[in-house]
Amino acid sequence: MKNLVTKSRYLSLVVLLLSMTVAVTSLYIYNGTRIQAEEFALGKENTSRSESWDGVPFTGHNIADISAIVRYYSSPDLKKQTTIAWFGNSQLHTLNQFKPGEHLAPYWLRLLAPCQNCMVPLGLSLANANPQEVFVLSQYVAKKVPLSAIVLEIEFMGFREDGLRGDFSKIASADLVNALHAYPVGKDLASLVGGGTEKHDGEEKKSELDSVLQQETENFLSRKLGEIWPLWKDRVNLRTSLLGGLFNFRNFVFNISSQSQRKIIKPRYLRNMRALEDMLASCRDANIPVVLYFAPIRQDKPLPYDKTEYAHWKEQVDFLAKTYLASSINLEKLVPPENWGSNFGLDIDFMHFQEPGHKMVAEALYPLIQAKIK
């Protein structure tokens, strides 16, 4: 009997060690695939780009780059410039079938101005951005950069997304949190961005010191563990690969393609509509003119939306624009079929177009912007 127990324990230990070996080996193999989280959903023909002028970036498509741009343009020396914040999703920073020398819409808008250095359109975009994130970004930028106007891209898919991505904690400050608390949906977002209730000066300094010490300790331990175990250092890539694999597996199992009809997710939709309203209200309160536009969308294929829901959404957005004195224009049909991407079976890109489309967007928006900043 004793021998049987010993053999059973030995067998269990062998199975455990073998399982661990297979698991670790699989992780190393899986980690060989490098995936950029921001690029994952862009599609085969799309390239993310950034624009610079005289070596100074004026478009960014992640929180770190946006923060650097805001820091630069918050300089007192640049206050005499006409600075415009142009918020959008990946359409704003993506070129379909990119060729060297091609540019994004903010670049072409800058060229349209009579003086390229006196009107600066800051292209600030996030892949799959939702109105909650854009609202927080607008508060962050407006608190630091004197804005002459805001250009706001609106598209339906963003209203199916929810919450704030973790990177927003990097721009959290007392000023930003307090600004969010002034608006209904902002109170909920304040806790997500990194602040709940106001603190007294002493409490805030102690909290900041504790946070810095904790972060430095965590960074040190994480760095040392990464030196010992490369998989720990690459854990962000592993997480992105896993989520990407799960996303593709879900689409395979449920036969979901880019042409599949997307329905409204009611709670998310309502939060995003409130965020849009709060953003427009805050711009009106701060006397910042807004030019809102419905983003171009591919028209040579049936749209992947419920027609009734989509029409109702556009009516609601138009109503909010009129209520809060924002100019609006519908650019859905602006870009012709030949300026979109190729078809890959059921995989059709409804969102990203080639450089001529970027020029068209800039040219369509320029008169409205000029009317607002005069």
Image: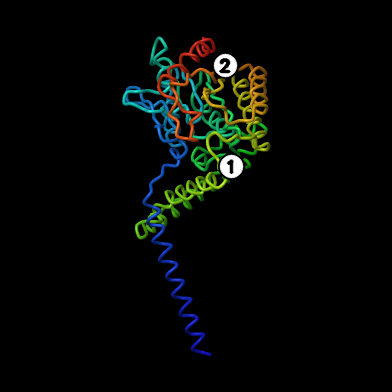
- Label of residue 162 in the image: none
Q: Nearer the viewer, residue 24 or 112?
A: 24
- Rendering coords of residue 332 (x, y %): 55, 20
| Element assignment for label 1 | helix
Q: Residue at x 39, y 56 (%)?
A: 231
Q: Quadrant of residue 227?
A: bottom left
Residues under numbered marks 1 and 2 in contact, where contact means CB atoms less than 8 Å apart: no
Q: How is the image coloured?
A: rainbow
Q: Nearer the viewer, residue 93 or 29?
A: 29
Observer-side mark, 1 or 2, equals: 2
Q: Quadrant of residue 40?
A: top left
Q: Residue at x 53, y 18 (%)?
A: 333
Total tally of numbered discs in the picture: 2
- The image shows residue 85, relative to residue 28, as above or below, that is above
- Label of residue 329 in the image: 2
Three-letter amino acid code of the residue under disc 2: Ile
- The image shows residue 350, relative to residue 336, as above or below, that is below
In the rendered structure, the answer to whether residue 358 lies left or right of residue 227 reads: right
- Rendering coords of residue 1 (x, y %): 53, 90
In the rendered structure, the answer to whether residue 125 lies left or right of residue 160 reads: left
Residue farthest to the bottom, as pictured: 1
- Rendering coords of residue 371 (x, y %): 53, 10
| Element assignment for label 2 | strand
Three-letter amino acid code of the residue under disc 1: Leu
User: For mark 1, does the 10 Å Cα neighbourhood hold few (<14), some (14 to 19), or many (20 or more) residues?
Assistant: some
- The image shows residue 89, relative to residue 226, as above or below, that is above
Which residue was labeled with disc 1?
192
Q: How far separated are the C-alphas under marks 1 and 2?
A: 32 Å
User: For mark 2, does the 10 Å Cα neighbourhood hold few (<14), some (14 to 19), or many (20 or more) residues?
Assistant: some
Q: Sequence-wise, which precedes: disc 1 or disc 2?
A: 1
Q: Nearer the viewer, residue 259 or 60?
A: 259
- Rendering coords of residue 179 (x, y %): 60, 32
